[in-house]
Image (cartoon, rainbow, N blue to C red):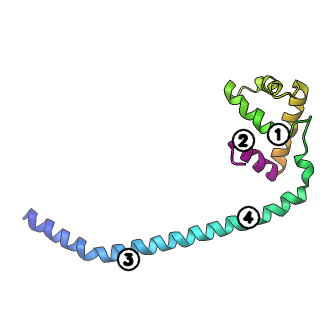
Amino acid sequence: MGMFKRMKDMKDMVEASPDMVRQARQMGAQAQEYATAQQAAMGAQTAQSAPAAAAAGTADFDPIGGVSIELYAEISKGLAAYNYDITKGPEVAASKGVSGEDWNAAMTGWNDRIKANRAVAQRFNALYTGRA
């Protein structure tokens, strides 16, 4: 009897498969529409943030203590060699020609700008991760 039940179950599954395939295709189409809508929303958000970044002005990107955002990202990345021990910051900065005092001013200033201005944070992130 078990064999006949399995054959009936298999027959039921084969009969149901066109509906399952149709549902899967509908779900795939819905997922594609959702992804397209999400990409459009992200594009709109990026377009809106660009004028805000421009409105912030270039002053937020001016060097602090002679340390540009590019150099700040480079020194910050150099801390990885010291297990991100910030007390080694002046040492890494000195290897890049930046005094300890200038490094401390830059670290405080750039961190404040990164917190206050999303465009600065995005630029730092791009530089730090090597995507700039």
**Which residue bears the numbered disc 2?**
128
CB within 8 Å, label 4 to label 3: no
Find the magenta span and give its range: 118-132
User: Residue most toward the left?
Assistant: 1
Residue 59 or 25: which is nearer the viewer? 59
Picture quadrant of residue 12: bottom left
Label 1 sits on a secondary structure element that is helix
**Could you tell which of marks 3 and 2 lies nearer the N-terminus?**
3
**Could you tell which of marks 4 and 1 lies nearer the N-terminus?**
4
Q: For the residue marked with disc 3, what is the amino acid?
A: Arg
Looking at the image, which residue is at 13% across and 67% down? 5
**Could you tell which of marks 1 and 3 lies nearer the N-terminus?**
3
Q: Residues within 10 Å of mark 2 (few under 14, many from 20)?
A: many
On residue 111, the disc is 1
Label 3 sits on a secondary structure element that is helix
CB within 8 Å, label 2 to label 1: no
Report how far apart the C-alphas of labels 3 and 2 lie in the structure. Answer: 46 Å
**Which residue bears the numbered disc 4?**
45
Q: Residues within 10 Å of mark 4 (few under 14, many from 20)?
A: few
